[in-house]
Image (cartoon, helix red, strand yellow):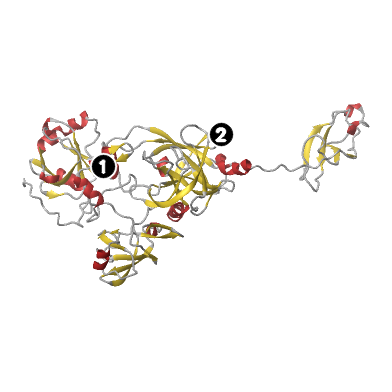
Amino acid sequence: TDQGCRQEVMRSAHSPLNQTRPKACSRTAARITCAPLPHPFRLGPRSLDICMAQTDGPSMFGEPEEPEVHVVHATPAVAKPVTPEQRKAWALRSVLKVFSTKVEPNYSQPWQMCPQRASTGSAFVVDAARRHILTNAHVVSNATAIYVRKPGTAKKWKAEILCEGKVCDLAILTVKDALFWSEDLKGLIFVPEPELQASISVAGYPVGGDSLSITKGIVSRLAIVRYSAVGRLLGVQIDAAINPGNSGGPAFADLENGQVAGVAFSKNVQTSTDNIGYIIPMTVVRHFLDEFDAHASYRGVPAPGFNTQDMENPAQRAYLQVPEGASGVMVVSVDPLSPASGLVQVNDCLLEVDGQPVADDGTAVFRDDERLEYSYLVRRLHVGDNVELKLLRGGNVVHASYKLEVKDHLVPQLHGVDSTPSYFIVGGLVFTPCSAPFLDIMFARGSRTRRVDLPVPVMVALTADKEFRGQQVIVLVQVLAHEINHGYKYSVTVCESFNGVKLTNLKHLTQLVDSCPSDFLNFGLEGGRLITLSRDEAVKHGPSILAVNAVPSDRSDDLIKVPSEDDMLVDNPAAPATTEPQP
């Protein structure tokens, strides 16, 4: 070969190299060394060049013999062409199958968990040196065990979550076993958002088989896509097939060079649509990875701190004194707990964000002949970054600058981010904070929550802002039937007060009930309705109600500790009384 080779052989007595030796030496071991050549030679019969045969030890006569040199016919090798499939193979070796075993929380009965279930997804190596694997957060969320498998192999390797970003639906995994990384696994390379009609190849492990699958399509458009309940971020729409199991797999822009345009994560499941899938582009992935590198966690996506509406009507523009040639959107509400409060006002016209003009329809330039919702200008930034706004107020241009924060929702949106199961039971009445995961379970129809079925006060709370930190909307989930609560059949009803005191959060209700000196417990519900229980009866029969319904405790762990004054929300000292009867 071009680098030379060394082989150990047994020399035969009939070999040309041994014809002059006594018969006793016919089994002497010898080493054959092939000298390097200036051009490559193919291994095999008649592929050797000039060789030297030298015995490893002395001959039977006691002294080493001089090497015998023989010329063997040599044939130059012809280089085999590398096929496109071989060039692609290295990138596909980095595409892994993910096996997850999950235990989801049960928000409708928060004292227990949902049944265990198993699911599969896809993932791929993004940094082999740091042992980082990228996948979707929904592939591994709430997992009790995670394993990954390389393509074409049977062994599964235990993996762990390093960072999870539920808002952007991304997660970083790692495999600690060094043997997993012993092979030549290489990290795939992200490239900027592809142009329209660019070719895309989606690799992963969808349903319908166990081996690696590749589907092809093109980029249809770029748009702001809903990733989660609180995340509307940049997404790339493609027409390549994305099915359950594809989630977390790479969407290749150039498979041969291992260049990835995005991460497969969702598809449009409406019956009236076809071939609409979405991938997470480099902009969102880079934001997530930068957060992990800087903070070893994912803090989320910042919010502007205000809501706007389009400003296309000529009469409205005239009323707001918008000059000819100017464009923007009108501010309709400002979050009182956001940094924008006091700097941005209702009826302000937002003209620019960080120097980028905002159009009357609420869009901003993204690329040539492409526009996106202006919110992407804010959501591409990090928590703590500074944003510069140009506003029109009363016909005068004003500027506002502040540091961005994550929105503190009145109704928590994501489990493990701003929501955890919590409950309090008294006299068979089950109370819990209203949250999006709770509503998803109670009002789910298929894979989506039907908002038209929600109670009106709950719908109002979904779009309302907090008035003070720690504020919660308390909901009566159900009534565990017993003679002491006979006649009460409420379900998913907002509880507004207790014994005439307006409630601030579930801890507040817990403390008021525990310290109640009255003989009666009065729970004020929405619309002026009232539930009254005997305090002595509730205390007496509480344990039996819990036992019958297999409830381990009358409250969740977060409520066992007596709340401090901060938990009582001194930010809201007024707590106006209601018109309910005082005990």
Q: Quadrant of the C terminus?
A: top left
The reply to whether callout 1 and callout 2 are in contact (CB within 8 Å) is: no
Q: Earlier in the sequence, mark 1 or mark 2?
A: 2
Q: Amino acid at mark 2?
A: Thr
Q: Quadrant of residue 324?
A: bottom left
What element does badge 2 sit on?
loop
**Which residue is located at x 19 percent, y 38 percent?**
491
Give x and y (percent) for residue 226.
36, 48
Closer to us: 451 or 536? 451
Closer to us: 106 or 374? 374
Give x and y (percent) for residue 470.
24, 52
Distance (Cα) linking label 1 and label 2: 43 Å
Q: Amino acid at mark 1?
A: Ser
The residue under label 2 is 153
- Residue located farthest toward the front when viewing the structure as drawn: 314
The residue under label 1 is 422
Give x and y (percent) for residue 517.
9, 44
